[in-house]
Image (cartoon, coloured by chain):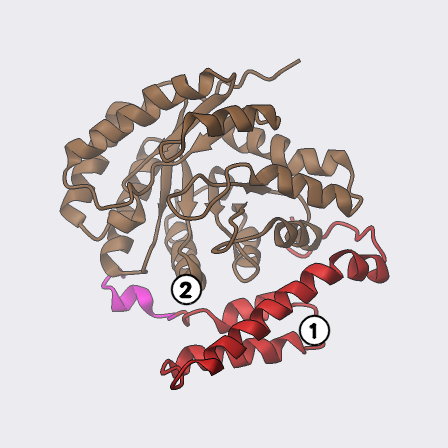
Amino acid sequence: MVSRTTDDYETLAKMGCVAMSEPAFWAGYDRGSAEGFRDYFEQLTSFEPTRAGWYGLQHFTWLCINAKEAENVDLSREVIAMIPEFLTRPGVLGIGEIGLNKNTPNEATVFLEHLDLAHRLKELVLIHTPHLEDKYAGTRMILDMLLGDKRTQPHRVLVDHVEEHTIRPVLEAGFWAGMTLYPISKCTPARAADMVERYGPDRLMVNSAGDWGPSKPTAVPDFILEMRKRGHAESLIRRIVYDNPLEFFGQCARFEFRGRG
Amino acid sequence: MSATSSTSQLETAQEAFNRDFLAARAKLLEVASWLDRVDRCPGIPEDARRLEQIQQGITALQSAQDNRAEQIQQIFSLEFNDSWQSDFGLQ
């Protein structure tokens, strides 16, 4: 987790985490060049797996230029052209997290070019849906783009950060859906548990975040506790936080997961 | 998979109500104290759209339907434009 200290890996390991999936995302500022992304991709594919490995955690990653920086189409195209150099590295799961931020034409253009790359190279796709007031319209736009490409196979796409008003269209279209737990800006453990109860466990998973703003990488255990308080079976909880991620990520040949015991 | 398939509720309504009553009470107090705080400040908020959203959100809490969270999400969402692709020149 580029944005977090090593202590967070230790804490995650102590809380039962065995692996993580880190998408390429924003640096906290707009990077100035494609070489900046080259260094970032190097960090994601080399140092972070090493650092996570100090605590017995497997680290997997995704590659893209994130939606916040996609307004710069020229830079985005340079980065997209560079992605294949890193795609064959161990632990790289596919293209992501691509998406929209403020739902602009340039962001949509860059999204479509990432999607084309993913389809040409037959990679999994991880989607970022926008924040707050932009989320509903942005999710609908993303679904339009995904479904508008005949090559899209919904079972190979994970649409992340779903909330109450976006989860249904994502699941009904056959995609995987991720619920991202944040203290304020996205979903809480209780609301994620509500969505599991409403929609069932098929193609649904929950994740946490190690972001620049208020975030809590250890939020998945909070969800586990909430589900237990409600009396749900361990098999259901395990499916959401363990089996479903393994099923989705396992579609990538570079996902070499070493389970424990 | 049907998007409407669900997992059984294992608690009774009374149990679910009791378990989160104090947390819900605290969250209502947060909203109430925030509104009081704004009232204590000179002037009035100028963002009519957001004020209206807050008022609609409070009204949605009193809805008899069991999708209040979804309703409030929509209240705070920008509208989706069905013709966005042609507007963007992508079709």
Kind of residue at disc 1: Gln
Does A189 sit left or right of B47 as displayed? right
Q: Main secondary structure of the magenta part?
A: loop
Does B3 sit left or right of B48 as displayed? right
Query: Tag 1, which secondary structure?
Result: loop
Do we see residue A43 in this rendering?
yes
Residue at (72, 44) in percent of width and height: A227
- Chain B shade in the render: red
Q: Which residue is mark 1?
A: B65
* Chain identifier for the brown-coloured part of the image: A
In x, y percent, where is residue A135?
43, 60
A92, B63: nearer the viewer: B63
In x, y percent, where is residue A176?
53, 44
Q: CA distance from mark 1 to mark 2?
A: 23 Å
Q: Is residue A68 above or below residue A242?
A: below
Q: Magenta residues, as a range?
A: B81-91
In x, y percent, where is residue A238?
68, 33
Q: Is residue A109 above or below residue A211?
A: below
Quarter occupied by the N terminus of chain A: top left
Q: Chain of mark 2?
A: A
Residue at (83, 53) in percent of width and height: B11
Q: Which residue is mark 2?
A: A137
Which residue is the extreme one toward the top?
A: A261
Q: Is residue A201 above or below residue B73?
A: above
Does A145 sit left or right of A136 as displayed? left
Kind of residue at disc 2: Ala
B17, A145: nearer the viewer: B17
